[in-house]
Amino acid sequence: MENAQNVLVIGASNNEERYSNKAMKMLEEYGHTPIPVAPATDSVLGKKAYASAAEVTGKVDTVTLYVGPQRQTGLFEQLIALKPARVIFNPGTENPAEYDRLKAAGIEPIEACTLVMLRTGQF
């Protein structure tokens, strides 16, 4: 796929009931490379999981969030350092207090559902 992206999945999970798990699978299905960030596990769906966004090296095109604002402390500094084009705030992860900081760093904050964006061709 020519628009294939490296997508950081913050809050990735091996639990098939979790939306982050569904997103990992669907991103791959649509030709993207999901990169799991999940401090509690070594791997998600067979991919090496990173304990934090700060550990990720290489290009990150998009970040999709699956952790609520109470678990986002220190996260935005790490994301700004990675310089993704956008951060998708999935339902329940919205954090409007951080949007201006992301925009100032040239990163677009989007309140949307990654699964819906993929299915409707908006990803």
Image: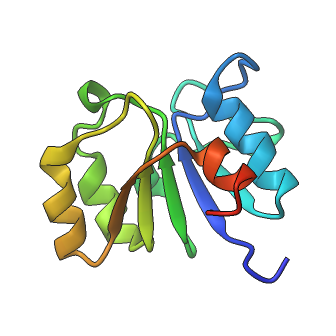
Of residues 31 and 53, the one nearer the viewer is 31
In the picture provided, is 89 more to the left or to the right than 6?
left
Quadrant location, the N terminus = bottom right
Name the foreground residue: 45 vs 121. Answer: 121
Which residue does the image show at 83% across and 39% down from the upper left?
A: 46
- Determine the residue positioned at 48% across, 55% down: 55
Q: Residue at x 61, y 59 (%)?
A: 7
Colour approach in the figure: rainbow
Q: Is residue 80 left or right of residue 118?
A: left
Expressed as whole percent of the image width and height from the top left, the position of residue 89 reads 40, 45
In percent of the image, x 62 and y 33: which residue is there? 20
Which quadrant is the C terminus positioned in?
bottom right
Up/down of 116 relative to 107, above or below:
above
Task: Using the rendered view, name the quadrant where residue 18 is placed.
Answer: top right
- Residue 56 seen in the current view: no
Q: Is residue 68 visible?
A: yes
Could you say which quadrant of the image residue 77 lies in?
bottom left
Is 47 left or right of 37, judged from the image as shown? Answer: right
Residue 6 location, x and y as percent?
65, 66
- Left or right relative to 50: residue 27: right
Q: Position of residue 118 (x, y in %)?
A: 70, 54
Q: List the single residue furthest toward the bottom.
A: 2
Closer to the camera, 12 or 53? 12
Q: How many marks are shown on the rendered structure?
A: 0
Pinpoint residue 40: horizontal percent, then vertical percent: 55, 24
- Indicate whether 61 appears above or below 44: below
Q: Nearer the viewer, residue 4 or 53?
A: 4
Name the residue at the front extreme: 120
